[in-house]
Image (cartoon, rainbow, N blue to C red):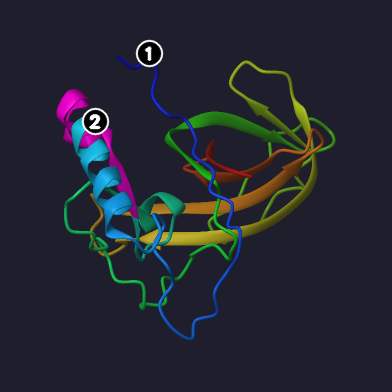
């Protein structure tokens, strides 16, 4: 019986085939290996439950969390939202490698130690200089981009949501996706 869940699975391609035809399957051309893999994954589902083995399905959305839907293995893999709409406020590629299910509270300060604010007109009060996540020590911000504004469901006041996203690079080499909503900073995702 497993003692812990899989945290990260990294696939590195050995080669890439041009889009001139069909790409060979992940399990190869033969059906036997594919069927064995399907049986193994179905068995894991039988032991741990249907939500234990999922497939990521890319779709449309503004935030990285909106763009990926996890579907139980064997279920139909349809995106929750189609990709084609323009999705104003969507971040430019590359997408973050890890989207946090529960964003982490953070504080962004300028060089003088004053908290950085973003106005309703998306004016940043000062250049971000340090990031503090939870009770951790502050880390220097060496580069940043943004804001990417998102103004969702403005026509329905009870469901309306305004936020601005920033990409930041920290002195320790970490790259993060931050969001500020109602004056609160959050770490939403981590870049690889």
Q: Tell me the residue at 26%/38% (across/down).
A: 41
Query: In the rendered structure, does residue 52 fall within the stretch colored magenta?
Result: yes
Quadrant where the image shows the C terminus:
top right
Q: Is residue 168 left or right of residue 5?
A: right
Vertical relation: 118 (above or below) 53: below
Vertical relation: 150 (above or below) 143: below
Q: Extreme bottom residue here?
A: 20
Estimate the x, y position of residue 114 in percent, counting from the top left: 74, 33
Q: Which residue is mark 1?
A: 3
Estimate the x, y position of residue 182 in percent, counting from the top left: 47, 42
Q: Tell me the residue at 56%/52% (across/down).
A: 165
Tell me the SS state at disc 1: loop
| Pointer 1 or 2: first along the chain | 1
Query: In the rendered structure, does residue 17 fall within the stretch colored magenta?
Result: no
Instruction: Name the foreground residue: 139 vs 98.
Output: 98
For the record, the magenta segment spans 44-56
Vertical relation: 113 (above or below) 60: above
Quadrant where the image shows the N terminus:
top left
Tell me which corner region of the image, top left, top right, bottom left or bottom right, holds residue 13: bottom right
Q: Nearer the viewer, mark 1 or mark 2?
A: 2
10 Å crowding of disc 1: few (<14), some (14-19), many (20+): few
Estimate the x, y position of residue 85 in percent, counting from the top left: 36, 77
Q: Which residue is mark 2?
A: 44
Mark-to-mark CA distance, 1 and 2? 14 Å
């Amino acid at each position: 019986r497993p003692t812990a869940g899989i945290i990260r699975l990294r696939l590195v391609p050995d080669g890439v085939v041009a889009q001139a035809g069909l790409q060979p399957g992940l399990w190869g051309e033969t059906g036997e290996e594919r069927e064995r893999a399907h049986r193994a994954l179905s068995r894991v589902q039988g032991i741990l439950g249907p939500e234990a083995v999922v497939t990521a399905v890319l779709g449309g959305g503004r935030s990285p969390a909106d763009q990926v839907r996890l579907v139980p293995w064997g279920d139909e893999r349809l995106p929750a939202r189609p990709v084609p709409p323009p999705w104003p406020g969507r971040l430019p590629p590359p997408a973050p490698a890890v989207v946090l299910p529960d964003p982490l509270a953070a504080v962004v300060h300028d060089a003088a130690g004053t908290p950085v604010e973003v106005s309703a007109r998306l004016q940043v009060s000062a250049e971000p200089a340090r990031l503090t996540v939870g009770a951790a020590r502050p880390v220097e911000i060496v580069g940043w981009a943004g804001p990417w504004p998102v103004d969702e469901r403005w026509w329905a006041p009870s469901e309306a949501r305004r936020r601005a996203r920033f990409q930041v690079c920290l002195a320790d080499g970490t790259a993060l996706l931050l969001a500020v909503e109602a004056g609160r900073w959050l770490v939403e995702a981590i870049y690889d």
